[in-house]
Image (spheres, rainbow, N blue to C red):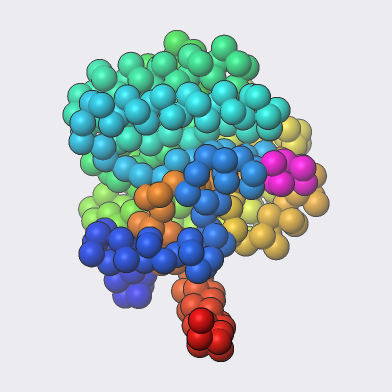
């Protein structure tokens, strides 16, 4: 836990992340978890995934824009992402962050741009998903999501199992029949609002998974399970079988480059698998959060850096 918290803290420090960002793509170690810095690179990775039967969700990395002009630029970029998915006939959607759409500037500005993106996706027969960010944004994210989903009906939302409030939030969302991406939660939240012990988060994840699948039998939810934990995946598979829920009425979501073995197992079992494909120049904070989640990720990067360092020292001087 101490290592995880330290790496997460480092991910918020530009003095740390900027130097890493200048080298990470050059030396290649970041490409395990980040598809690239450009949309073209993300689309190329998506083509490969889709050719192997996966669906994709494109995610432009970055958070908390500070000007309306920057928010509008991001909005246009999101729409371009949807249109490129359509032009290349790729199975998938996009994931959006409301803080990239000016949520810190003006709620109505953010709502209008989220609606604009969803409307364009709807016109193309596609969906969007809204990421859930830190707890300071939970209420306002739910408000905007509800508004856009009620009008257009093509939105999904991430719900975090480590928040005590999530069971009540699902009751609130049931009437709008939305896709819900259940995740454990990746932000460092205080103990008065978030479950701190991993085993207790796992218990709540299982409980909410069952609730979503039971709701799916009534048409209240389309559950999407965002986890790389084999125990959580197995629980969702067992519960869907118990409820005799057709495989096309729920899905699993995993992150690009993480637990590719488990991704293969889920796909081989006949379940729908959507891969979250992150890209962008502001990739380093995201990358470090991925490192904080599993010690094995840290060792992977250290091994990569060591191998690259050895290779560099062996190259003859020019």
Res. 228 visible in picture = yes
Q: Give the number of callouts.
A: 0
User: Residue at the front extreme?
Assistant: 318
Q: Residue at x 64, y 53 (%)?
A: 233
Q: Is residue 36 above or below residue 100?
A: below
The percent coordinates of residue 222 (x first, y second) are 59, 30
Left/right placement of residue 238 relative to residue 115 reads right
The dominant secondary structure in magenta is helix
Left/right placement of residue 67 relative to residue 122 reads left
Q: Quarter-wise, where is residue 64 in the image?
A: top left
Q: Residue at x 33, y 16 (%)?
A: 112
The percent coordinates of residue 109 (x first, y second) are 26, 20
Q: Quarter-wise, where is residue 262 in the image?
A: bottom right
Q: Residue at x 73, y 32 (%)?
A: 248
Q: Is residue 231 magenta?
A: no
Q: Which residues are magenta?
A: 47-54
Query: In front here: 111 or 33?
Result: 33
Query: In front here: 74 or 125?
Result: 74
Q: Is residue 50 magenta?
A: yes
Q: Is residue 140 above or below residue 151?
A: below
The percent coordinates of residue 95 (x first, y second) are 48, 35
Where does the N terminus fall, quadrant-wise?
bottom left
Q: Quarter-wise, where is residue 11 in the image?
A: bottom left
Q: Is residue 191 above or below residue 253?
A: below
Query: In front here: 52 or 153?
Result: 52
Q: Is residue 137 above or below residue 178?
A: below
Res. 239 visible in picture = no
The percent coordinates of residue 71 (x first, y second) are 30, 29
Q: Residue at x 44, y 46 (%)?
A: 280
């Amino acid at each position: 836990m101490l290592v995880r918290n330290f790496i997460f803290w480092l991910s918020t420090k530009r003095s740390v992340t900027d130097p890493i960002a200048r080298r990470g793509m050059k030396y290649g170690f970041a490409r395990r978890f980040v598809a690239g810095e450009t949309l073209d690179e993300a689309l190329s990775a998506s083509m490969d995934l889709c050719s192997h039967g996966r669906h994709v969700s494109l995610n432009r990395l970055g958070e908390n824009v500070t000007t309306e002009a920057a928010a509008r630029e991001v909005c246009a970029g999101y729409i371009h992402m949807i249109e490129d998915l359509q032009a290349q006939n790729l199975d998938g959607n996009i994931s959006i962050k409301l803080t990239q759409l000016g949520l810190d500037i003006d709620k109505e500005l953010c709502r209008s741009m989220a609606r604009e993106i969803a409307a364009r996706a709807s016109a193309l027969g596609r969906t969007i998903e809204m990421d859930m960010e830190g707890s300071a944004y939970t209420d306002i994210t739910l408000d905007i999501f509800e508004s856009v989903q009620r009008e257009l009906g093509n939105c999904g939302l991430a719900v975090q199992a480590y928040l005590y409030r999530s069971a009540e939030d699902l009751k609130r969302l049931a009437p709008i029949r939305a896709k819900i991406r259940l995740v454990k939660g990746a932000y460092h939240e205080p103990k008065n609002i978030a479950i701190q012990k991993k085993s207790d988060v796992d218990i709540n994840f299982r409980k909410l998974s069952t609730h979503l699948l039971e709701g799916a039998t009534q048409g209240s939810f389309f559950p999407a399970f965002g986890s790389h934990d084999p125990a959580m995946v197995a629980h969702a598979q067992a519960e869907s079988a118990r409820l005799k829920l057709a495989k096309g009425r729920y899905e699993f979501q995993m992150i690009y480059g993480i637990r590719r073995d488990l991704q293969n197992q889920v796909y081989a079992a006949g379940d729908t698998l959507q891969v979250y494909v992150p890209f962008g120049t502001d990739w380093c904070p995201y990358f470090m959060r991925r490192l904080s989640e599993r010690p094995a990720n840290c060792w992977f990067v250290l091994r990569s850096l060591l191998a690259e360092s050895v290779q560099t020292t062996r190259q003859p001087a020019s």
